[in-house]
Amino acid sequence: MGNILLISADNLVAQSLQAALPAYGLVTHCLTPADGRPHLQAASPPAIILVDARSGTDDLRALQSRHTEISGSSARHIPLIGLIDSAADRAAVLATGADDYLLLPLLPAEVNARLAAHLQPAFASLITLLSIFYNASNLFTPNGLNVQVEQVARYFDAAAAWLLLVQGEDFQLIGSYNLPPMLQNAGTLLEETTRCLEGVQQLHGWTPLAAECPYLSPAVRQTSSGLSYHLTVPLVWGHQLVGVLKLAYPSLPQISTATGQMLAQLGQSLGGLLTEFLHHDETQIYATQNALLVMIAQMISEQRTLDTGLALILEQATPILNAASSEIWLLSKDEAWLTLDTALSRKIGLLAGMRRPADAGLLGWVVQNRRRLHANLPTTDPRFALSIDRPVDDSLRCLVGAPILHHDTLLGVLVMYGTRPNAFSTSDGAFLEGIAALTASAIANARMMEELTDYAAQQRILYEMSQQIAGGLDLEVTLERGLEWLQRLANTEIGLLWLLESGPGQSLKLMVARGVTFSTDSPVLVNLEQSTAAWVVEHGQALVVNDPQNDPNVNQTVCSQLNLRLKNVLSLPVLYHGQAIGVVCLLNKIAGSFEPNDVTLLSTAADMVAVAVGNAQLHTQTVQLVAEREQLYQQMLQTERLATVGRLTASLSHEINNPMQAIQGALALALEELNNPAEVESYIRLSQQESARVVTLVNRMRQIYRPHSETPRVGDITSLLQEAIAIASKEFKRQKVQLQDNLAVALPPVKAVANQLHLVFLSFILNFAEAIGSAGGGNLQVSSYPENDHVVVKFQADASTITPDQWRQIIKPDAAQASAEISFGLVMSYDIVVAHGGQVDCRQTSSELVCMLKLPVAGKG
């Protein structure tokens, strides 16, 4: 065989062609027609010319012109074949005068078959026959190829001919010429074709055979057109029967070897052509169906309700599949029943009412197997169940059903009904599965939106609930509001809220009830071992009892005490920081039984109630503790005042004793000088002065242990320091302490409880004095001055006058370890200063010990 000349600017085409035809020699590749012309004039011209016509037919026309000049004087015609990438371009290529075409990408089997025919001169006529079919635009319509079949019949001198296309188990007549009346019946034509094919395949494989038709009786032969011999040509592609060409003769035809080979090649080529067109049509069908699916999907997305969307699906899909009626059945939650949701025309179909079992019958088979069902003549199908699948009438001839699946979850069944056998093809079933997938998405999206809407409503209710119950800290109000919200969410007749009683033999006490009444004078208590509440408290989980009458754990005593008649019960733990503090019982749901969604929602709500109840309890306990602490603090403060008075008793008793002795002496002298009024008056005045001194001392002492006010006021602390120094003056003498005071005259005002700061100053002065006195005496400096936004009071002493232990007690007082010499008042003093927003800063150097009290200026702290 000669070379193949390829005219193409695409190197990949040359490579694929060479790989597809290794037996045909080398492929000569030229980029343009001008490059290929010298090869046409060579002594050994190419056997076939292939031209790339994807970018247009100009190159093909130019080469055809030169090809015509050369082949006109040549003894052999060189086949010219165009390369295209779409079947739609074949007419344009053939119109230029090309002999044939090939579709890109190149398939080795197709290339070999096509080129083999052109490489043998005997098949030139075959090309002419095939070209008859190339330009047909109505291949697969009934009688769409009558003209082409007539030309084939005339070419082979047949009196009649017909062409049939395989359709599943049947044949479709797509072209005929002088079809005998006897065979115009579809059943007879099918039977005759099937029997002939069986004989041909059994004897010769897929080879055309001229044989007397054994299915026409002599009488029929005589009364028919006399066509006693049929030539059967199977149309095969890839070992698959695509169709059948029948040629009929009145007498035994003479079929030469060449003609037989031509017919065999015609059957193979025409089978390939029909297969190509079938695939092209299927592609168009799939494209059309996909476009319809996209359109339906868009229309569904615009619908607001599921019912409208499902009805729209049936309205669009039913006429596309030429169905007489259609239905959508939805599967129940327990997968036990199919319920008719949407139907379009119930004139035919399965009369099963609105509900049918999901495990029987034709539709039950779809549910159980989750596969498409194609039932021709459904009443004869072995899966047909008469008790369930009752046809509306006898017009039902075909049924196709597809499972409505969404992510492996079965939602229902989509079914179409037809009034003629084989009303639905395999491609129809595939298209129905696509519609079922859209239906599944629509149902899943609608249900999701419904769930989201419900969830949003629940979240809104939970938010409102949290706002109402979280804002209050009153325990009784919180319990009432919490139970009210829980009962509202659960939609129950009765609600009970129990709190756990502390102590041995724990029990639950009924705190709040709704829907029933109980007396608070006689509390309702439940032992944890006597009810389902024990399990709820122990496990910290919700418990549903939908049959309380037969549950032995239900406390019948409480039911009698509260006069309860139970239908169902949901018990929820009240958990605060992981610990059960109570139980909520919701009784007798108004609509049905409690479901898992109820448990989830109400558990969340119960947790919110638990936090509110726990916080309210904690608040009540905190208020009690604060009151107790304040009471203890006041007691400790009073104790410190009395202790301070006790520490000053010795000095004050001496301080009071001196003026009292002076008063006593002055009064005695006055008695002696009664006749001398001037002397008596002087003694009386002296007594008044000394008595005033005693009164002043007593008032100072009383101010220490019985202050006038505990209310913070803005004032000057200099007077408080001076008062403390005056009270401790006698103690200084007793402890041999030399006081050096350097008090600022005009300090910024400080907001404080005056008697408390007075006690702090006095406590520090006395503790420093006692520490210095224990070392034999020394100096104590007391000063005050402003510093930034604070007023500083500084106590300073020589380091040598205070022992390390005494200093540690001053800078870090410990009430449990305070010595007898160091007053517990230093602990209180630290607390008082901090409570006033101040701080105590004590430091030690090699020569001195310093304690500074810093108090914020009024309006700055």
Image (cartoon, rainbow, N blue to C red):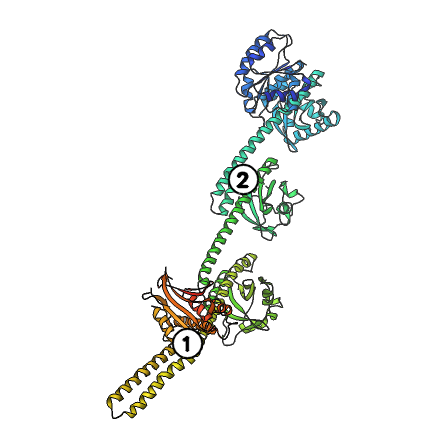
Residue 376: give x, y in percent of width and height.
Answer: 63, 39
How crowded pointer 2 is (Cα within 10 Å; few <14, some 14-19, many 20+) is rated as: many
> What is the number of the mark on residue 731?
1
How crowded pointer 1 is (Cα within 10 Å; few <14, some 14-19, many 20+) is rated as: many
Q: Quadrant of the C terminus?
A: bottom left
Viewer-proximal residue among 800 and 30: 800
Q: Quadrant of residue 722?
A: bottom left
- Work out whether 755 lies above or below 77: below
Residue pictured at 54% horizontal, 33% vertical:
287
> What is the number of the mark on residue 632?
none
Name the amino acid type tagged 1.
Answer: Glu
Viewer-proximal residue among 53 and 626: 626
Name the amino acid type tagged 2.
Answer: Thr
Q: Secondary structure at mark 2?
A: helix
- Work out whether 541 lies above or below 664: above
Say left or right for 78 vs 464: right
Query: In the rendered structure, are the residues bearing label 1 and label 2 in contact, judged by CB atoms less than 8 Å apart?
Result: no
Residue 257: give x, y in percent of width and height.
Answer: 72, 16
Say left or right for 859 vs 628: left
Viewer-proximal residue among 529 and 847: 847
